Amino acid sequence: MAIERILNARAGVLVLIAYVSMPAFSQTQSASRNFIGMWSDPPVTITGDFCASWCTDAGIERLDALLDDPKNDARPLAELRAEADNYQRENYIRPHLTDAALKTYPLDRADDPSFLRCEPYGFAQQFIARHQLEIRQPAKDRLELRYGEWDARRTIYMDGRKRPANEAPSRLGYSVGRWEGDTLLVETSGILASRTPWQSEHSDQLRVVERFTRSKDGKTLTLTATMTDPLDLREPVVIKHIWAWAPDQVIAPYDQCEIPTEVKKGVR
């Protein structure tokens, strides 16, 4: 119910813009199956802001419950969001972590190489990065995903191929995709060990299944990702991310990172 509220939260003429800007090859497809173009920050709603990076159903439900409780009417919204975020981390994420992962959970964001040394994200942080996501189809057998954060680029092979047996693990892994109705399903493996969005470690055995769906009105793109890792997760973790259609935006070269001169520890 909460996700539906986000997806229906914005009104306007974006549907018409989206249709007009569709490439010719894709106009024979249903509108909900055409993801080509520019997407960016989620709809401007309370829950959309909560899911601006990543969220879980448990976190969304907790936030909804807090907002619906009259006793919280005087509490600042930021405080309610923080409580819901802490709830999903402690009551959903933590029970999914193995003993090995729990030894270092949560990792301090101040020690994150992307913050400390301006090193690009690993896959698990990159694929739900904030801001722009541009989806292109440079050839019939593949899609390209380009992210505004770090100007990262992924290739999604759509021709049924498998990851080569001799393919070495890489920062963004090896991705293959297929259509299941109007859902784009992408499976990624061969990912170098790094950090998760919730600041725990993951191994090079991490596998991620992404399911992209476009809303019927064309305004939003929702990602539901299932993450498995036999070394660091007891069972799969499911997270969500939402983008809004943003045809007028462009991705500029990423030069915004500055190595900090002072580091504050203990901030999530």
Image (cartoon, grey):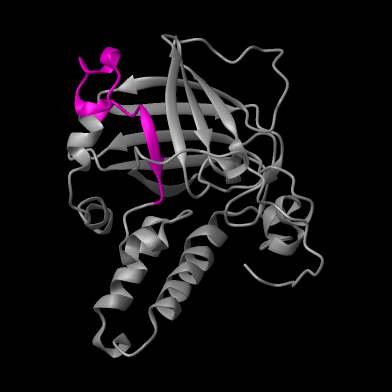
Position of residue 123 measured from the top left corner of the image (x, y, whole percent)? 61, 38
| Residue under the point 64% across and 52% down | 98
| Residue drawn at the location 36% of the way across and 35% of the way down | 212
Quadrant containing the C terminus is: bottom right
Give whichever of 158, 19 is nearer the camera. 19
- Residue stretch rendered in magenta on the structure: 20-41
- For residue 265, say whether it is visible: yes
Which is more toward the observer, 116 or 190? 116
Q: Position of residue 219 (x, y in %)?
A: 25, 43
Q: Is residue 5 left or right of residue 86?
A: left
Question: With respect to residue 209, does 116 lie above or below?
Answer: below
When asked about the image quadrant of residue 260, the answer is: bottom right
Q: At 43% across and 23% down in the image, what residue appears?
A: 136
Seen in the picture, residue 101 relative to 180 is either above or below; the reply is: below
The residue lying toward the viewer, choosing from 52 and 202, is 52
Front in this rendered view, residue 101 or 31: 31
Q: Tell whether position 26 is magenta.
A: yes
